[in-house]
């Protein structure tokens, strides 16, 4: 199903994203088709539009989210951008808890939609934001609807109903492998569940940072993190650790060799996809472009005058 | 010289859970070497053969050492060194 060209609201622009063949970065595996699903084509510029919209729609439908409440969640960025857009479009108030060290661009994008920002300790990372968000909700239970992307089943459901079905439509029965990185694990859980229902076995691989301290924004090193409640470690057929430097280098190559300027988590996804392709020799691998690289452009204080 | 080093959450498994540790040295490089002696494995998390890893930020007080003299940045008694991840995980 193609995306309609005329629509009544920005929320209708979510999904039906293009799938692009990677020819240059995957040329080490000539017998394998490697495809990247461009989730940055969503109106909020990231894969997070899908779960954010699903979580809001499901909560509105069963009365958890009303006009009297403020939707609150912990997010270092893309989910927050998505909530902010759909909150503005659908008429709901949004508050976001994020570590103070997220990029200025993220803060500015979400503020543009009228969203309230609450900052947590930069030393505590995204888990610090989660803990602070829980505390705020516990203190003000009537004020907030806690969307809780790490626990909300609507998050993986968005990918079960949307992303996975689109991938099957786009590559047909060629698909042999799917790989994506773990953040909330929503994409991995939802897509994997749907692909495992397919009549023929499709191998689903979960990638995650190799080390606890890493630079793959949006991805989680599960062993050292608060484990998302939606995460089932046994669901993926394989787990693959990725070094930050490999993800960063692949993100650079995607821009220069494919014309796809993506964020570091996408670099990690594609690095993993190419690694699988090199191993399997023949087949078809699909992975996800979570967001664009320009979301990380605005220099943080420590990046000024610094060339990577 | 005793310098206070702030340790981010992901590295606290190496420091027995401590969020602040003391280290001795006249430069950031010496501080990191001293940390490695007391908390083996820490140095590889922070540095590679080229210096500080690209996604790791080390601050001397309020300044990123990349804009100072990197690993050769001199430290003095009472300084605070902070290791701050470039990013935050989860989205």
Image (spheres, coloured by chain):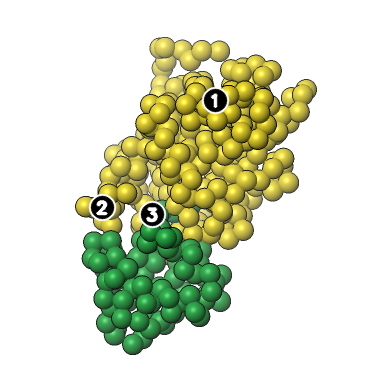
Q: CA distance from mark 3 to mark 1?
A: 28 Å
**Residue at image x 53%, y 39%?**
A271
Q: CA distance from mark 3 to mark 2?
A: 11 Å
Q: Which of the 4 image quadrants contains residue A204?
A: top right
Residue B48: percent from the left, percent from the top? 43, 60
Q: Residue at x 21, y 52 (%)?
A: A305
Callout 2 secondary element: loop
Subunit that carries the residue with mark 3: B
Can see residue A72?
no
Q: Which callout, 2 or 1, points at the residue further toward the start of the chain?
A: 1
Answer above or below: position of A252 versus B71: above
Residue drawn where x is 40% and y is 12% of the image = A6
Chain B, which colour?
green
Q: Which residue is nearer to you in this view: A125 or A229?
A: A125
| Residue on which disc 2 sits | A306
How far apart in space, not on screen, are marks 2 and 1 (Cα)? 33 Å
Q: Is residue B10 visible?
A: yes
**Where is residue A219 drawn, in percent x and y?**
51, 47
Q: Find out whether the residues at labels 3 and 2 contact each other: C-beta distance under 8 Å.
A: no
Discs 2, 1 touching: Cβ within 8 Å: no
Compared to residue B86, the image places residue B59 above or below, namely below
Chain A: give its colour.
yellow
Farthest-out residue, bottom: B1
Look at mark 3 in the image and give the residue it sits on: B54
């Amino acid at each position: 199903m193609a995306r309609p060209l005329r629509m009544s609201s920005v929320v209708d622009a979510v999904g039906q994203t293009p799938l692009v063949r990677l020819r240059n970065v995957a040329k080490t595996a000539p017998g394998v088709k490697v495809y990247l699903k461009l989730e940055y084509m969503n109106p909020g510029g990231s894969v997070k539009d899908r779960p954010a919209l699903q979580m809001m729609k499901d909560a509105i439908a069963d009365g958890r989210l009303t006009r009297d409440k403020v939707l609150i969640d912990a997010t270092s960025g893309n989910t927050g951008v998505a909530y902010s857009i759909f909150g503005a479009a659908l008429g709901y108030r949004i508050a976001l808890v994020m570590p103070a060290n997220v990029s200025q661009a993220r803060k500015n994008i979400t503020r543009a939609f009228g969203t309230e920002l609450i900052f947590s300790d930069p030393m505590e990372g995204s888990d610090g934001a989660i803990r602070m968000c829980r505390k705020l909700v516990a203190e003000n239970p009537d004020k907030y609807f806690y969307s809780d992307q790490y626990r909300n089943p609507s998050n993986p459901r968005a990918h079960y109903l949307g992303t996975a079905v689109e991938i099957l439509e786009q590559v047909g029965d060629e698909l042999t492998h799917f790989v994506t990185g773990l953040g909330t694990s929503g994409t991995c859980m939802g897509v994997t569940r749907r692909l495992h229902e397919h009549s023929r076995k499709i191998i689903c691989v979960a990638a995650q940072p190799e080390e606890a301290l890493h630079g793959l924004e949006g991805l989680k090193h599960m062993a050292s993190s608060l484990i998302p409640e939606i995460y089932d470690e046994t669901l993926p057929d394989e787990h693959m650790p990725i070094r930050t430097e490999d993800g960063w280098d692949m993100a650079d190559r995607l821009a220069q060799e494919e014309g796809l300027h993506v964020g570091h988590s996408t670099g990690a996804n594609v690095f993993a996809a190419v690694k699988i392709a090199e191993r399997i020799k023949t087949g078809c691998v699909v992975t996800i472009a979570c967001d664009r690289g320009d979301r990380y452009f605005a220099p943080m204080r420590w990046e000024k005058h610094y060339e990577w | 010289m005793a310098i206070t080093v702030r340790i981010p959450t992901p590295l606290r498994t190496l420091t027995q859970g401590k969020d602040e540790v003391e280290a001795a040295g006249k430069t950031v490089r010496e501080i990191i070497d001293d940390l490695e002696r007391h908390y083996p494995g820490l140095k590889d998390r922070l540095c590679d053969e080229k210096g500080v890893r690209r996604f790791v930020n080390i601050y001397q007080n309020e300044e990123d050492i990349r804009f100072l003299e990197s690993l050769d940045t001199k430290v003095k008694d009472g300084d605070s060194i902070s290791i701050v991840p470039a990013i935050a995980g989860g989205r």
